[in-house]
Image: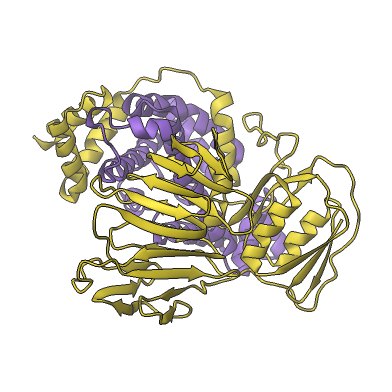
Amino acid sequence: MMKEKIAFLLSRLSNQQLSKVEFEELSDLLNNLEVKDEFLFVINEMIDRTHAEQVFDEKRYAPLLNKILIADKQQKLASQTPVHMLRRISVAASVLFLIGTMFYFLFFSNKSKNQVVNQASHDIVAPNNTKASITLADGTSVSLEGIQSGILAEDHDVVVTKKSDGQILYDGNGQATDGKLIYNTLTNPRGSRVVNIFLSDGTQVWLNAGSSITYPIKFIGNKRNVQLTGEAYFEVSKNKEMPFWVEAKRMHVEVLGTHFDVKAYEDESSTQTTLLEGSVNVVNQSGERLLKPGQQADVDSKIQVIDDVDFDMVLAWKTGVFNFKSADIITIMNQLRNWYDIDIVYLGKPKSETFSGIINRSENISAVLKIIEAAGIGFKLEGKRVTVIF
Amino acid sequence: MDSLLSHQRNLFLQIEQGNEEAFAELYALYVPVLSSFLTSLTHSSSITDELIQDTFLQVWLNRDKLSTIVHPKAWIFKIATHITYNFLRRKITERKILDHSDVFSLTTQVGVEESYYTRQLFHAVSEAVNQLTPQRKKIYLMSREGGLTIPEIAQKLGLSHSTVKNTLVTSLEYIRNYLKSNGFNISMLSILFLKTL
C-alpha cells in the first residue's frame, strides 16, 4: 500500500506533475522515518528498471572521477600508473590547484626570485578557535572564547546558548522585550575563526573574521533588519510577512528566504553581495537591482551586476581555504590580514601581477608567504608585521 | 558464473587494493545507468553529477569492504538509493520550493548549491586524512600518493601484510566516522556489509 503510494508520488515528481496536495504528502512521507525502508525499496526498484540511455560521457564525467580520487590525497603527484580514463584537472593559463597541505602556485609572470622568508623565530599560526564576543543591550560583553556549551547569556528574557559544536543559538521566545526592538552585536575580531549563529527567527549567519553584525534579539514588526560590517554568509529563514534586510556600507540588501554572502569591509573600495539561492534586491542611493542566483552585485557608488560568479572563491573563507583567482597582491594580503591578524607594510612599487591558487587556511603564515614568494615577491615577517617587498 | 558478474567482482578486488584504473572502469560502467535514472528524476544535470559523485565517493571510501560483496551491482545501486533518498529529504523538507509542481525548478537554476554541499563533503575527506595519526597517515599516503601495494608498503616499512592492511582499514573507518560526525551521513553502509542481497 505504502510502496505503491510512494512509487506514485515519485513518478509524479519525475514527470514534474506533482500537485500541491501531493507535494505535501511526499514531504510528510520523506520526513517520516518509519517509511524510510519503503522509500529505499521503491527508489532501488526505479534504478533497477532504468535502461541506460547514453554511453559514458567521458568529457563530462572524467573530471568528476578525478576529484573523487584526489579527495583523500594530500599531494598532487603525477600518478604512477597513467590511466587513460583519468584527465588531469584542466588548467587555465593563470592556473589553480589543490586542496591539502601542499600546494602549487603558478601565475602569469615568469619572474622568480629565490628569496626565502627568514625563518622567523615566531611564526604566526592559523587561528584554532573563535575569539568572537557578543555585546548585550546593556553594553556588557560576553566572550565566546573557550566557553563550553551551555547558556551564554540572557537578555530581556531571550536566552543565548552555545551548542557543543560551537554554534550560537538565540531562543526567540522571550516576552520581556515589550514590543521594542532590542539589539545585540556579535563581533568577530581578526585572527579568529568563523563564528556560526542562529538568530531568533532561525536565520543562520556565518560571520567572518574582522566583522561584526548587529541584530534584534527578537524580531518585531514588519521588517527584519540587521547591520553588517565585514563579511557574512546568510541562510535566511523564509517569512513573507517580514522581509529580511541587511544594511552594510554602501548598500542595503532586501531578502526573502535565501542564501547569500555579503562582503562589506571598511577598508575595501566596494561592497559585494553574492546570491547562491533565492532572491535579493540590492539597494543604494543610485537605485536598486534584483539579483538572480549565481549573480553578484558589486557596489561603490553604482551597482554593477556580475553573472556566473565562482562560489567556491566567494565562500572559500567559510570552507577553510584561501581561494584566489587572478587576485592581486593587495587582495591576497587583505585576506591574510584578516585570518592571521597581522599588520602590513608595502615597500616598493606594487606589481600588477595576479595570482591564482587554493591554500589551506590551517597553514602557518610563513608557509603561505613562501608560496607567494616563489612568484617573485619578497616578504619579511617580524612579530605581527609583514613587510611586502616588490 | 555470469562473466560480467565475475568481471565486476574482480574489479572490486582490485579497487580494494587501491587500484585507480579498476575504479575508473567501474565508474564508467555505472555512470550511464545512474545518470539516466537521476536525470529522469531531477531533470538537472548538475544535481545528477553531484549525486553520482557522492555515490562513487562512498564506494571509494568503503573500498575496504569490496572483497566481501557478492553482488556488486546491487551494492552500488543501494548506495545510490540511499544518496537519492537523503537528497530528496534534504531538498523537499528544506521547503525552498515555491512552486510545488516543479520541485527542482529552483535548484535547477541554482545547481551550484549542490556543488557547494559536495565541496564541503570533499573538503571534509581531506581534513579527515590530515587528522590521521602519523603512522596511519604515512601508510595511507604511501598507498594513495605513492601508489604502493600492501606488500610493497609492508616491505618498505618492515611490517607484516596484515598490519598494513588493518591500518588502511582503520584509516578508512576513521574517514567515514569523521564524515558522519560532520553531518555527512550514509549510515547504512555498515549494515550493507552484512546484508548483501
Farthest residue in the front direction? Answer: A285
How many marks can you see? 0
Q: Residue at x 59, y 62 (%)?
A: B130
**Nearer to the camera, B54 or A175:** A175
Against B156, is B93 above or below? above
Which color was chain A given?
Answer: yellow
Q: Residue at x 45, y 18 (%)?
A: A54
Judge left or right: residue A128 versus residue A337: left
Point out residue B104 in the picture as x, y percentages from the top left corner.
32, 32
Against B133, is B119 above or below? above
**Nearer to the camera, A23 or A263:** A263
Q: Quadrant of the N terminus of chain A?
A: top left
Name the image colouring. Answer: by chain
Q: Residue A83: in sight, yes or no? A: yes
Against A262, is A137 above or below? below
Q: Residue at x 49, y 40 (%)?
A: B12
Point out residue A249 in the picture as x, y percentages from the top left corner.
52, 54
State which quadrant residue A370 falls in: bottom right
Q: Residue B154: in sight, yes or no? A: no
Judge left or right: residue A235 versus residue A300: left
Q: Residue at x 62, y 64 (%)?
A: A339
Point out residue A46 in the picture as x, y percentages from the top left corner.
27, 28
Against B163, is B21 above or below? above
- Identify the chain drawn in purple: B
Q: Quadrant of the C terminus of chain A?
A: bottom right
Point out residue A210 in the picture as x, y percentages from the top left corner.
57, 65
**Nearer to the camera, A107 or B151:** A107
**Nearer to the camera, B109 or A229:** A229
